[in-house]
Image (cartoon, rainbow, N blue to C red):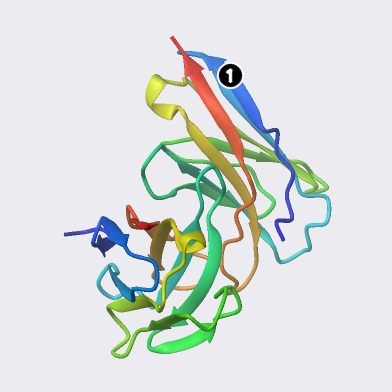
């Protein structure tokens, strides 16, 4: 496909369970971003990669959140020991280079019960 | 923290122009103004961006004041599909997009 692809689209996790969310950026895009969006709020920045390097992880809310992009393409956001407050839509975006438009995926809706 | 101020919500009649204002009084010389929108249950979508000149593309026009402290996004002929939350974002270099609360635009038939 031509766009950013995220999987799964929906995930229900029991509290305490670990989850892994996948993002397939547009081929060749250097920059990759993860955002968290709570209901009724704007997206909140989590972390940013340029190729395989994680340049900014200041938005990760706790050490339970971990992101990787080992080969500079696909990225995985992992949340350990999920809690109810982790329930949100997790958005991934990619862009070709600085100051060009970012393309967003449709997001993964995580519900922790 | 978002560097922009936008009205919480606006209504617009279908077929009319929608003018969405944004204040960014602390913008610095190397910062661009970007607009994105988010339709319900979708990821944000890029609309347009500019530095100091007015810009137009197939989706919208962006008018930036001479002092660059404010801008207006114009959708010339709003349709029901333009109903969305519109985000005005100030951005420089390789810093990630920082979203505020945006303006919820409702296009009414």
Q: Residues within 10 Å of mark 1 (few under 14, many from 20)?
A: few
Q: Residue furthest top?
A: B109
Whether residue B44 is situated above or below residue A84 in the rendered picture: above
The residue depicted at 57 percent of the width and 73 percent of the height is: A61
Residue at horizontal 26%, vertical 58%?
Answer: A3
Give the quarter of the image for residue A45. Answer: bottom right
Looking at the image, residue A74 sits to the left or right of residue A37; the answer is left
Q: Quadrant of the N terminus of chain A?
A: bottom left
Q: In the rendering, at what x and y percent does residue A12 appear? A: 29, 58
- Camera-side residue: B56 or A104? A104
User: Is residue B48 depicted above or below A77 in this figure?
Assistant: above
Hey, which quadrant is residue B72 in on the image?
Answer: top right
Q: Which residue occupies 49% across, 61% down? A: A36
Q: Position of residue A73 (x, y in %)?
A: 28, 80
Relative to A56, residue A86 above or below: above
Quadrant of the snapshot with the C terminus of chain A: bottom left
User: Which residue in the protein does label 1 denote?
Assistant: B11
Q: Secondary structure at mark 1?
A: strand
Does A22 sit left or right of A58 as displayed?
left
- Residue B76 vs A36, above or below: the answer is above
Residue A82's quadrant in the figure?
bottom left
Q: Residue furthest left?
A: A1
Front position in the image: B15 or A107: A107
């Amino acid at each position: 496909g031509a766009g950013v692809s995220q999987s799964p689209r929906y995930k229900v996790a029991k509290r305490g369970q670990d989850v892994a969310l996948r993002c397939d950026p547009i081929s060749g895009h250097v920059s990759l971003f993860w955002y968290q969006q709570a209901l009724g709020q704007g997206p909140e920045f989590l972390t940013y990669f340029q190729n395989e390097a994680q340049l900014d992880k200041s938005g990760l809310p706790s050490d339970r959140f971990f992101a990787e992009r080992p080969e500079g393409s696909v990225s995985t956001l992992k949340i350990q020991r999920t809690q109810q407050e982790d329930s949100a839509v997790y958005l991934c975006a990619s862009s070709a280079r600085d100051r060009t438009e970012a393309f967003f995926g449709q997001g993964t809706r995580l519900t922790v019960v | 923290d978002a560097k922009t101020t936008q009205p919480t919500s606006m209504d617009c009649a279908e077929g009319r122009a929608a003018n969405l204002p944004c204040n960014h009084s602390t913008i610095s010389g190397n910062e661009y103004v970007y607009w994105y929108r988010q339709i319900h249950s979708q990821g944000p979508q890029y609309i347009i961006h500019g530095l100091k000149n007015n810009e137009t593309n197939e989706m919208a026009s962006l008018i930036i004041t001479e002092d660059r402290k404010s801008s207006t996004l114009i959708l010339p002929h709003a349709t029901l599909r333009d109903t969305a939350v519109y985000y005005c974002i100030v951005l420089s270099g390789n810093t990630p997009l920082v979203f505020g609360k945006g303006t919820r635009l409702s296009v009414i038939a």
